[in-house]
Amino acid sequence: MTYTKKIFAERLSQQIVLKYDIIRIARWAYDEFTLNCRDLEPGLKSEMMRIIAMEEGPEFEMTEQEIREFARSLSEDGSR
């Protein structure tokens, strides 16, 4: 089964609802990547890396609102 942008966006949105914690969300995204790396929709890897990179420093961090918008845009992109 292909791991799509829409699936990642939905799961990312769920993670934000659980608790907004940059490190936790970045590590969750890394886990999602490693579990699904062979089945990623084209273009999804780079999008996932944007979330994973948040752990690397403040220059990569997104606010809660930015992550919500990012997830929404991924979901919309995945619906086309």
Image: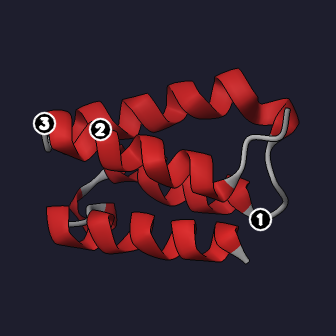
Q: Is residue 22 left or right of residue 71?
A: left
Task: Evaluate if marks 2 and 3 touch, with contact meaning CB atoms under 8 Å apart.
Answer: yes
Q: Is residue 7 left or right of residue 53?
A: right
Q: Quadrant of the C terminus?
A: bottom right
Specify the label residue 77 is tagged with: none
Identity, as a three-letter code, of the amino acid under mark 2: Gln
Identity, as a three-letter code, of the amino acid under mark 3: Lys
Residue bearing mark 3? 19
Identity of the residue drawn at 55% across and 68% down: 74
Question: Residue 43 appears at what percent x and percent y?
Answer: 77, 65
How far is mark 3 from mark 1, CA to CA? 27 Å
Task: Evaluate if marks 1 and 2 touch, with contact meaning CB atoms under 8 Å apart.
Answer: no
Rendering quarter of residue 44: bottom right
Q: Is residue 73 left or right of residue 80?
A: left
Q: Secondary structure at mark 3?
A: loop
Question: Residue 16 appears at what percent x and percent y?
Answer: 23, 45
Task: Evaluate if marks 3 and 1 touch, with contact meaning CB atoms under 8 Å apart.
Answer: no
Residue bearing mark 2? 15
Identity of the residue drawn at 26% across and 31% down: 24
Sooner in the amino-acid sequence: mark 1 or mark 2: 2
Dot 2 alpha-carbon crowd within 10 angstroms: few under 14, some 14 to 19, many 20 or more: some
Question: Residue 51 appears at what percent x and percent y?
Answer: 43, 53
Sooner in the amino-acid sequence: mark 3 or mark 1: 3
Residue bearing mark 1? 43
Q: Quadrant of the N terminus?
A: top right
Identity of the residue drawn at 67% across and 70% down: 79
Q: Is residue 51 left or right of residue 5?
A: left
Nearer to us in this view, 7 or 28: 7
How far is mark 1 from mark 2, CA to CA? 21 Å
Dot 1 alpha-carbon crowd within 10 angstroms: few under 14, some 14 to 19, many 20 or more: few
